[in-house]
Image (cartoon, helix red, strand yellow):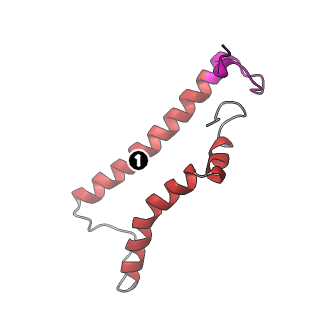
Amino acid sequence: MVDRVSTGSRQGLSRQQESLVAVFYGACCHGCFVAGVGAMMIMMFFGMSRSFGVLHAPWSYLANALLLAQFPLLHSMLLSRRGRAVLSRLAPHGLGGV
């Protein structure tokens, strides 16, 4: 049986370099998640009273609708063929295949 992880063109990366790339990508991903959750916690602590500005109706309704729609739309796009191509280009060739 062929081990998919250890074969293929990988730009000459050793196993140790592959591990370092994986740790770096994992740290970046988790760091972004912690920053997002931290920002949410701060906003909730202040009762959602702190912001970068105010939108009045009807613009506030539109902004809320766009914020609600971005999650399913972005995830649907990333799961499509085109989205997978974008995600595979984020890692060195041979390391990010899905």
Image height check: is 34 above or below 16? below
The answer to which image quadrant residue 95 occupies is top right
Pinpoint residue 41: horizontal percent, then vertical percent: 28, 52
The residue beneath circle 1 is 35
Q: Is the magenta stretch mostly helix, strand or loop?
A: loop
Q: Where is residue 18 in the image (x, y as percent from the top left)?
A: 64, 23
Image quarter of residue 6: top right
Placement of the C terminus among the 4 image quadrants? top right
- Nearest the eye: 10 or 72: 72
Residue at (72, 22) in percent of width and height: 13
Magenta highlight range: 1-18
Horizontal relation, residue 47 to residue 7: left or right: left
Quarter holding the N terminus is top right
Q: Verify whether residue 78 appears in magenta.
A: no
Q: In this view, does 64 lie above or below 43?
A: below
**Identity, as a three-letter code, of the amino acid under mark 1:** Ala
Residue 10: image location, x then y, percent:
74, 26
